[in-house]
């Protein structure tokens, strides 16, 4: 397996960096808008090729944007370039080299990193030999690669430039799966502060202004000998007020869907429908959730217990999920938080042997007899675990309609408590034995 190399996409705002990122990635993963400053933090994805080599692709914010985020974006990009093996320096191939492009070029020349100039937005062949493209030779980085994210032009050439950098590393251990954790919550709940606290450094921009994070940001972390991918999601508002915020919401929902574990960050001073909806989203997808009650350094004594109880009452449908009091600002409870994430992940990936499961079914039937429907008893014929993450159990019955709500809950409780799934969602499918018979699916925490 090749060691992981880092390729950073750099340039001024609105030159097509995120479009190039999406094209190399092969999906619409980064938010792309025709306004500057959409990307603020460094967005990272690992790309693995069929030939067995891989690299980390980093989409950075627009440099020297002349807005309130200019310094923060520059710091994030500087940090990304400390570990970069190659920089794709993007400029608008139709507009030519601007004064900001020249400033970025000077800044890159002062850094010990290989740079490839990339002319973006070359959608028309007429632009290929334009004076705007010729200006790039004056930057001193060699021949520019002509690209069109819309049409895929230049993408194979860029991949060919990256491939020689990949180095075989026999010591690389692929036996341990990465644990992907999505950090979600309302705007300004402290999600980015939590990510920075877990990493031990200021990796993403933190501001008191709600909605600072616009996209879902992936960051690699190794903890306790295990690789993690932490996703810092944009804060989800109930009703997006603009198209950009609508797409931000979609990216956050996608992060929940692809996560192994969700950390729901809760502000003790703000709790309500936002958290309820996020909890429902995680439960719907069967994703184990850890509730992190943040900013607890601002709560004292008896109020801490009251705050925890209020959270449990408000998010009653996550009553079995771990609840932790943390302070992202001071680092309190963060080690325990990662430990809980790893623990619930292992719990959600348990598999119960069919023989053992059916032996337990017999015990459960003896403890509480199945209900009768007009003199006809419910019969449980067979049970099997069909999947993990979420743990999914199929219970074959004579008539699905005979399963009362109370008996359904009884069996779910028994599965969770007797089989060791107490802190994660389980999915139970009651299925008629008759061909074409009814089926009932229930996901419960």
Image (spheres, rainbow, N blue to C red):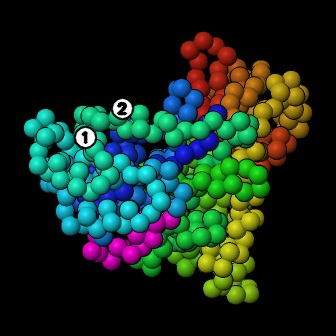
Q: Nearer the viewer, residue 256 or 358?
A: 256
Q: Nearer the viewer, residue 57 or 317?
A: 57
Residue 146 badge? 1
Q: Pinpoint residue 119: horizontal percent, then vertical percent.
A: 25, 47
Q: Compared to 224, does 352 lie above or below?
A: above
Sequence-first disc among 2 and 1: 1
Name which residue lies at 83% across and 40% down: 419
Q: Residues within 10 Å of mark 1 (few under 14, many from 20)?
A: many
Q: Compared to 361, does 55 lie above or below?
A: below
Q: Pinpoint residue 68: horizontal percent, then vertical percent.
A: 33, 77
Left or right side of 92 for 328: right
Name which residue lies at 73% across and 78% down: 305
- The magenta stretch is 65-79
Residue 156 badge? 2
Left or right side of 273 for 135: left
Q: Compared to 431, does 290 lie above or below?
A: below
Q: Pinpoint residue 432: horizontal percent, then vertical percent.
A: 65, 20
Q: Nearer the viewer, residue 89 or 150?
A: 89
Q: Is residue 349 visible?
A: no
């Amino acid at each position: 397996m090749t060691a992981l190399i880092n390729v950073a996409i750099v340039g001024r705002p609105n030159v097509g960096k995120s479009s190039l990122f999406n094209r190399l990635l092969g999906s619409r993963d980064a938010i792309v808008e025709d306004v500057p400053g959409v990307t603020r933090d460094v967005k990272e994805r690992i790309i693995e090729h069929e030939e067995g080599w891989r690299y980390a692709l980093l989409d950075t914010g627009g440099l020297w944007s002349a807005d309130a985020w200019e310094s923060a974006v520059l710091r994030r990009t500087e940090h990304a370039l400390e570990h970069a093996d190659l920089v794709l320096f993007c400029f608008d191939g139709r507009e030519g080299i601007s004064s900001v492009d020249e400033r970025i070029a000077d800044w890159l020349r002062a850094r010990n990193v290989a740079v490839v100039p990339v002319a973006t937005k070359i959608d028309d062949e007429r632009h290929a030999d334009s004076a705007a493209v010729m200006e790039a030779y004056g930057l001193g980085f060699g021949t520019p690669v002509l690209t069109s994210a819309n049409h895929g032009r230049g993408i194979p050439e860029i991949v060919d430039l990256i491939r020689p950098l990949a180095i075989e590393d026999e010591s690389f251990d692929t036996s341990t799966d990465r644990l992907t954790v999505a950090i979600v919550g309302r705007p300004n709940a402290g999600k980015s502060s939590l990510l920075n606290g877990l990493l031990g450094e200021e990796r993403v921009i933190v501001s008191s202004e709600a909605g600072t994070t616009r996209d879902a940001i992936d960051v690699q972390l190794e903890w306790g000998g295990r690789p993690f991918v932490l996703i810092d999601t944009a804060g989800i508002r109930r009703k997006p007020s603009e198209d950009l915020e609508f797409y931000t919401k979609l990216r956050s929902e996608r992060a929940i869907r692809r996560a192994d574990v969700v950390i729901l960050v809760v502000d003790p001073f703000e709790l309500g429908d936002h958290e309820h909806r996020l909890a429902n989203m995680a439960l719907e997808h069967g994703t184990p959730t850890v509730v992190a009650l943040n900013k607890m350094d601002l709560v004292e004594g008896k109020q801490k217990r009251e705050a925890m109880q209020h959270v449990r009452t408000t998010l009653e449908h996550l009553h079995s999920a771990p609840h932790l009091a943390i302070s992202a600002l001071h680092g309190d409870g963060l080690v325990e938080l990662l430990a809980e994430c790893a623990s619930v992940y292992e719990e959600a990936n348990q598999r119960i042997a069919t023989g053992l499961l059916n032996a337990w079914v017999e015990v459960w039937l003896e403890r509480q007899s199945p209900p009768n429907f007009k003199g006809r008893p419910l019969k449980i014929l067979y049970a099997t675990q069909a999947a993990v993450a979420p743990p999914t159990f199929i219970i074959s019955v004579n008539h699905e309609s005979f399963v009362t709500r109370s008996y359904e809950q009884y069996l779910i409780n028994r599965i969770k408590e007797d089989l060791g799934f107490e802190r994660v969602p389980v999915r139970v499918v009651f299925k008629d034995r008759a061909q074409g018979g009814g089926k009932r699916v229930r996901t419960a925490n």
